[in-house]
Amino acid sequence: MATNQEPDLVEVVKDGIYIIRFNRPKRKNAFNDKIMLGLGPALERAASNPDAVIAVVTGTGDYFTSGNDLSNFTKGASGSGGASDKKGEVNLELLAQATVGSFNRLVKSFIDFPKPLVAIVNGPAVGIGVTMLGLCDIVYATNKAVFHTPFVSLAQAPEGCSSYLFPRIMGQGKAAEMLVFGKKMNAEEACKLGLVTEVFPDEHMDQVWPRLHQWAKLPPIAMMRAKGLIRSHLKDKLHEVNDLECKRLAESWTTEEFMTSLMKFFTKKSKL
């Protein structure tokens, strides 16, 4: 029986704005294979689309995104690139390599995106949902947004170039509180520290769009040239950081420490 269910990643072009929306509201917009593998190509389509002057990433429902769907590590994901051994069982090392390869390409697409990229954080953001913000040009957030990077508690490594960008944005100490100790940050604090550009009352988040529509009327080539100058001295460094972070991420995913943390996470989740 056919269904009219929307895809996990929705793309719409309207009035010069290419909107990319995470669309798994029942799973708090967690990144499954379809989003992980589809977001990079979506950004590439936004970059090449002549009708798109700026791009927006946002989420459906109450969450921006809860980050990487960790259930991918407990089952053979369809997009894992053949991460099974000869018996057909999931090989964690192969899965880690396949996943980190997809992750590396995703972050590269953010680093190389040539047009202005705006994040509209419509709710809580976790993991990659937080780290990608450092790679965006502007971040607007609802006052209900909370930012959380629980990498170490899950025995993982920071990603999304956050190990380099966050100390630059908010200072060494605050970056350590987030990336090492997993401290949650509210929208006002994130704005004060520079991770968020501006905070809007949740009921007035629609005020963002008239501003974006106005900016979409600006000369597109001049905007890309200005962004290129701002980012040019960082791009090579960010690619270097991304490669190193992904290497450490792959290493962490194959450790006993990670599997123990993962089992604790799902045990706690099942009790809730």
Image: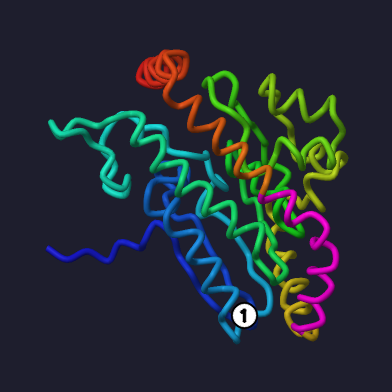
Q: As displayed, is residue 124 above or below residue 132?
A: above
In this rendering, position of residue 266 left or right of residue 201? left
| Residue at x-position 54% and y-position 26% | 156
Front residue of 199/251: it is: 251
Q: Split into 4 quadrants, where in the image is the N terminus?
A: bottom left
Query: Residue 125 location in percent, x, y?
Result: 61, 41
Element type where label 1 sits in the image? loop
**What type of secondary structure mainly makes up the magenta span?**
helix
| Residue at x-position 38% and y-position 21% | 266
Q: Is residue 232 magenta?
A: yes
Tell me the magenta residue range: 220-239
Residue receiving disc 1: 52
As shown in the figure, which amino acid type bears the numbered disc 1?
Answer: Ala
In this rendering, position of residue 209 left or right of residue 192? left
**Which image quadrant for residue 180?**
top right
| Residue at x-position 53% and y-position 48% | 104
Question: In the rendered image, is residue 124 in sight?
Answer: no
Query: Residue 74 location in percent, x, y?
Result: 31, 29
Query: Residue 224 location in percent, x, y?
Result: 76, 75
Front residue of 138/272: it is: 138
Query: Residue 268 location in percent, x, y?
Result: 42, 16
| Residue at x-position 55% and y-position 66% | 43
